[in-house]
Image (cartoon, rainbow, N blue to C red):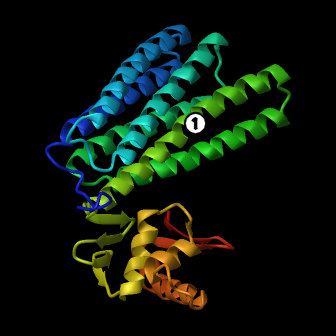
Amino acid sequence: MNKSTAPLASKDTEPKFSLQSEMAGTILEAAGVLASGFAGGITWSEAWQTIRDLEHKGDAIARDLFEAQMAPGALPDGELVQKLTGYLDDVLDAIEAAAARLAIHRIKRPLPAAREMGEIVLESAQQLNDAMHALQEMHDVFPHTRALHRLENRGDDVLREAIEGLFAGRASAKEIIKWKDICETLEASTDRCEDIANVLETMVVQAGAEDRLVANRLVMDIAAHAATAAGEEILLSAKEFDLLHLLLRHQGKIVRRERLLGEVWGPDYFGDTRTLDTHIAWLRKKVESKGGIRITAVRGVGYRLDPRD
């Protein structure tokens, strides 16, 4: 069996996913303590100590996961599993590092942007925890990974606005350096959550377990090779279906023109690139209005699919 297409959901792999679910639960617990610190329910000194203990627990789980991957019967695609384990550990490390900075600086009045970043970290941890549990059944993983992508985008926006506000205001150089460091550390955890989302999506696709993709009123049934909008079937050509599939899998993110052409028309396609634009135009007419979605052209890069508000 080819290692890239080997099934991931088997009896032998369940303990590994169980351990990673435990790691995700530890991350969620740490994010909850961090949020409590921002809400004033616990001092930062207490929060840091609790999160440090959770980070040590996470290190122990990570060691077990890495050792399990070396054992006979481990997952064929060990690289994906190692990436997933490393990224989970990175998320917990970033949360601990943020708590450490907040405690060391003896923060009493958090910057509003930092408090908002703490909320985003907690939401990301919840989606991550749900995604890891869904991975054990290889079912309904994509709703959680898409949420992680959106939260990472939101974290980027909050960080950018925070830095702009710090430099535009009357904050001292010390305050600017302090809060920039804290906010960037918090945002780093959401970056790693998005890396995890990418790995989980790859696992599901390689396992052939991807079943249904949803964006607003648009639903794509992968197994049935069918799509509906507001419950009404949409007739799509093979190329339109493959384009929509790729855009839905990465909704909220730009999919490069080169990737769309390569995966839909094949790596050896050397035809007119306007063919892609023509198919996208046809696809828009069929799915945008009824499906409540928007396919946006990003000049010089590619296309992005987003649910309409």
For mark 1, give the secondary structure: helix
Viewer-nearest residue: 66 or 297: 66
Viewer-nearest residue: 260 or 187: 260
Q: Looking at this rendering, what residue extends furthest in the left direction?
A: 11
Q: Residue 82: x, y in percent?
A: 39, 40
Quadrant that contains the N terminus: bottom left
Viewer-nearest residue: 203 or 219: 203
Left or right of residue 213: residue 304: right
**Is residue 301 visible from the viewing direction of this image?**
yes
Q: Residue 296: x, y in percent?
A: 58, 73
Residue 202 falls in image quadrant: bottom left
Q: Residue 233: x, y in percent?
A: 28, 82
Amino acid type, residue under disc 1 in the picture? Ala
Asked if 104 appears above or below 287 in the picture, the reply is above
Q: Residue 211: x, y in percent?
A: 25, 64
Residue at point 31% right, 56% down? 204
Left or right of residue 174: residue 274: left
Residue at point 64% right, 41% down? 158
Q: Which residue corresponds to mark 1?
A: 188
Residue at point 47% right, 63% down? 251
**Is residue 116 visible from the viewing direction of this image?**
no
Residue at point 25% right, 60% down? 209
Q: Residues within 10 Å of mark 1 (few under 14, many from 20)?
A: many
Viewer-nearest residue: 255 or 252: 255
